[in-house]
Amino acid sequence: MPQTDVLIIGSGIAGLSVAIKVAQRFPKRRVVLITKQESAESNTRYAQGGIAVVSDFVNDSFENHVQDTLDAGDGLCDRQVVEHVVQQAPERLRELIELGAEFDRDGSGELILGREGGHRANRIIHFKDITGLNISTALLKKAATLPNVEILSHHLAIDLITQKDSSGSTRCLGVTVLSLNSHQLEAYSARVTVLATGGIGQLYQTTTNPVIATGDGIAMVSRAGGSVSNMEFIQFHPTAFYDTSTSPAFLISEAVRGQGAYLRNAAGERFMFRYHIDGELACRDVVSRAIATEIESSKDNFVYLDCTHIEPHIISNHFPNIYQTCLSRGIDMTKQYIPVAPAAHYLCGGIDVDLMARTTIANLYACGECSNTGLHGANRLASNSLLEATVYAHNCFEDIQREFENPNPSSAPVPNPRPSWFVEDKPEMVKARTDLQALMSRYVGIVRSDEGLEYAYRRILEMQSQFTEDEDAIHTPAWYEFRNMITCSLLIVRQSMSRKENRGGFYNKSLESNEVFG
Ligand code: FAD
Ligand code: SIN
């Protein structure tokens, strides 16, 4: 049975940052990072706009960033968390740069600051429109130089191994892991376990998230009895390239609107000022609902993003990836409008953690998109996600450091997993995944209703009952992922049913609130 000091699940910004920090501080400790596809695959890799950090203290301030985050979160952020994250940002950015991440600078070497929705100042640090790829590459490169970090790609974490103590509280002893190469199911024991498994975008038909985003860590914690909340707050990004033939949906960064692009409806009208005084740069929840309303009334499937008034060299210099990808899909964005529609993008809630990334299960941490820290409240401010992940990865590392300085660690034997034979998927498995995505998109999307939520709840329970588990068998990776998608969908639907007021990214038309575009 593999024994580890620190077992990390996920190779995005959160998981890699924890791995690097712990391994550097404790060169004799064994850090194992498990990830279900290639190590480079993650939501992090696709991040475009950048990372929100106050660095111009003349035109901006920590207080401004705090206030913008609180406003976006629509009254549900934890102010103490927001202040902490915003104030830690410059130090964490400095570390990312030290680790090799590059960011755009002007001729005198100053960081170039971009703008996105909900920010009252230019404060987005970025590398062209491929900020995430740049950060991910730098972190993977650094991790590869550390002899005590072992990255196991194509390994799927299945379940937490837990134990209840005499007081009834639960402790994590490690994780059962399926090797996708050898098809072996093994128990990995760990002094501490860190979940950095990312989001849930794949629960929806149209999403900017890659296929890995199936909510695995959140479902694992929920099954183990840990606390998970704010799952009803799904952020839909307003501007994904509309093209039903490709998945995931290609994102057209909010930074393009920050550069001055307009949203136009089917009639060519610039509609956003009818919904909010900040027009195209209102917060994402407002812009996505406005687009959904325009789409509903025009009966088209998309609206347009108009960049034709922006200097072509600005487009090709600042957004080379977006420009080229649009060209490859037949749109020259310097001359033509881009068809765009909202897509599931980010989960604001998740596994409940405290300021040190500790979950409600002892010896188990969570950081990054899978966690619910209190930073985002009802709606995340643009580019606060990479920031949150790096700040909480650091806090997690600091707490692990304290744990390792404890001379008398608690330990318990980890049982071997029982399963012994494979069960093939039923043929209806693939269809079940797409059926679930269609159901979630239709009834648990940008605009929800009581009847829709009740219907979705019943249907998901029916789907769940068709896929009963044989505990003594090894299932396929697709089966395990589908089980996690079902668990997360049920959490989202139940928590949506419990919310009795519309806030931020949550809108239930049955509540007949006046706060829709508030
Ligand atoms: P991820 O980067 O998603 O990594 C999760 C990892 O866990 C993956 O390696 C995955 O394979 C692994 N994993 C999951 N389940 C298992 C399992 N069962 N077993 C083993 N491994 C598992 N945020 C910003 O702040 N700024 C931006 O500009 C920005 N742009 C974005 C653009 C796009 C297109 C997308 C999709 C997101 C964007 N975001 C942005 C959001 C941000 O990228 C993510 O929230 C953030 O990168 C999440 O990092 P993470 O480390 O928590 O998870
Ligand atoms: C974008 O570039 O629009 C995405 C930014 C984010 O998700 O924070």
Image (tube, rainbow, N blue to C red):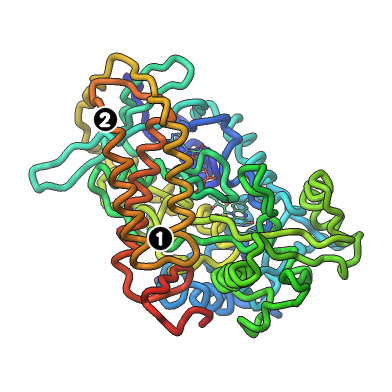
* Residue 89 image-quadrant placement: bottom right
- Label 2 to label 1: alpha-carbon separation: 32 Å
Residue 17, above or below 352:
above
Left or right: residue 78 compared with residue 301: left
Residue 183, above or below 275:
above
Q: Secondary structure at mark 2?
A: loop
Residue 29 visible, this angle: no
Residue situated furthest front in the rendering: 299
Residue 28 percent location from the top left of the image: 43, 29
Identified at 60% across, 30% down, the residue is 145
| Tag 2 residue | 469
Q: Mark 2 or 1, which is nearer the eye?
A: 2
Residue 219 percent location from the top left of the image: 34, 44
Q: Secondary structure at mark 1?
A: loop
Residue 350 percent location from the top left of the image: 39, 54
Residue 30 percent location from the top left of the image: 42, 29
Q: Residues within 10 Å of mark 1 (few under 14, many from 20)?
A: many
